[in-house]
Amino acid sequence: MSAKGPLIIVPTFWGKQQSRRNNEGSQNKRDFRVMSADAQALYEHPSSIDEEHPPLERLLESLTHLPGSFGVALIVNTNDKSVEVRADERVRDITRQFPSLNTFVFGPTEMGSLTRRLEQLELLSAMSALSMHSYGATRNLGLLVAAIKGYDKVIFLDDDCVVDDPGFLEKALFGLGDSIHTGGHLLGKTGLAMNAKGRYLTEEDGRATDRFWHWDQSRNRGISELLTPPRLTPAKLAFGGCLALHGGLFARVSFDPWITRGEDTDYVINTRLFGSQMFVDDQWTVLHLSGEGVSQPLRFRQDVFGYIYEHRKLEFAKSQVDLAQVTAEQLSPYPGDFIDGSVGMRARITALLRAIQGPERGVYWQAALHVVGDATRYACAHCSDYFSFQRMWPTMVERLWNDVALHPLFSGERTVDRSALTGSFKAIEVEDTP
């Protein structure tokens, strides 16, 4: 039986320092060289662990004005393991400021409980993907929390968003789970994110160095297509800070833990690969008040990793007989323009142009030399990993739905004195049988 109302899932990311990275060339160059060898998570807008009033406070305060019944699950993640416990404590302190909200915090202790339960269910092999420090892994943990607590409708909000529409929940649930005229049911949809100026489109700078990398123009054209009737249109992209999923979809399709950035739009692609369809609701919006984030070179790096990975993933999917055909052309203008076979060449040319003109030239020279090769190796190594994890996902969700062991703990029926937790489980060693 479904829990009453939807579950609002808020992935919340934390770090040691203020979210804006140092813009000095030497610092960015050092960061880029460290990050270029792999695709470890680089959260774009992490809250500082010492920030007096982090954005999460603003979001939770806005939720107190919503009518109706709903739960709120906060999934804590960090870009630095050394602040993991402090981030967990900070989030719990913040939630106590809003006693009217039905909140649940998923942190290190809950991760330990989930790990032991998956071991008992003989699904421990999935933990390597769930414990990754990535946007996709964090969202998957939120979906598992929903399953454990018995929610069949979830709404994702980013912690730097604000809900300023009293009808937010009503619009989020509009049509969700209902049949549609083209056949089937509407099981997933995204709203639109509005910036502080009340705009849906990003400002286009038209830099000459980006003549092969018109990211803002392609994305704006994609969004503009959504701002015309009808209210619900098939999605090519998604906004993770305004995303609603029905259990009929999220119990079958997971997020991809290996994509470095754009896991929300990647989920649109995943649903297509597995025979479903996401929609965009142009009447459902959220206010997105993001900070400055990481430097442009580091963001460029993550984009290149993400787009090359997506291209390789779609190419791999073509060889799988049980997956639908999805092409870059079907997803044009965005993200299709950036996940075709030319993305590597265009990324290298763009890095060279930025190395010749503009700021942070040394960092972009490093990008021209390394990022495409590193991204290609990463994509080749991991383009099949998601599909291996995805095969386990429906079984995992089914076994954890209203789980008799975790549900009482995750629902507050079995309380834990967190100050008394002084030990930890040791790693499980499996001996090879002769």
Image (cartoon, rainbow, N blue to C red):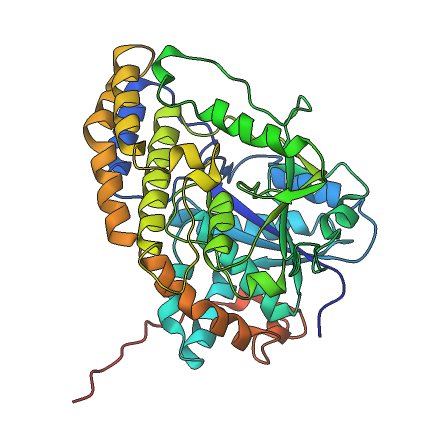
Residue 409: x percent and y percent? Answer: 60, 72
Relative to residue 339, is residue 291 drawn left or right?
right
Q: Quadrant of the N terminus?
A: bottom right
The percent position of residue 345, horizontal first and vertical second, equals 26, 29
* Residue 256 shows in the view: yes
Reply above or below: 140 against 29: below
Q: Quadrant of residue 103?
A: bottom right
**Residue in front for this viewpoint, 220 or 7:** 220
As drawn, which residue projects farthest toward the left?
434
Horizontal side, residue 374 vs residue 204: left or right:
left
Residue in view at x 75 percent, y 61 percent = 5
Which quadrant of the structure image shows residue 304? Answer: top left
Q: Residue at x 48, y 27 (%)?
A: 218
Residue 430 position by quadrant: bottom left
Where 206 sits versus 112, above or below? Answer: above
**Residue 416 can be seen, yes or no:** no
- Looking at the picture, does residue 119 appear above or below residue 353? below
Residue 241 position, x and y percent, is 60, 42
* Horizontal and vertical percent position of residue 209: 34, 14
The correct choice, above or below, for 174 with respect to 340 in the image is below
Total labels: the figure holds 0
Image quadrant occupied by the C terminus = bottom left
> Which residue is farthest bottom?
434
Nearest the viewer among 87 and 265 is: 265
Residue beneath the point at 59% across and 80% down: 404
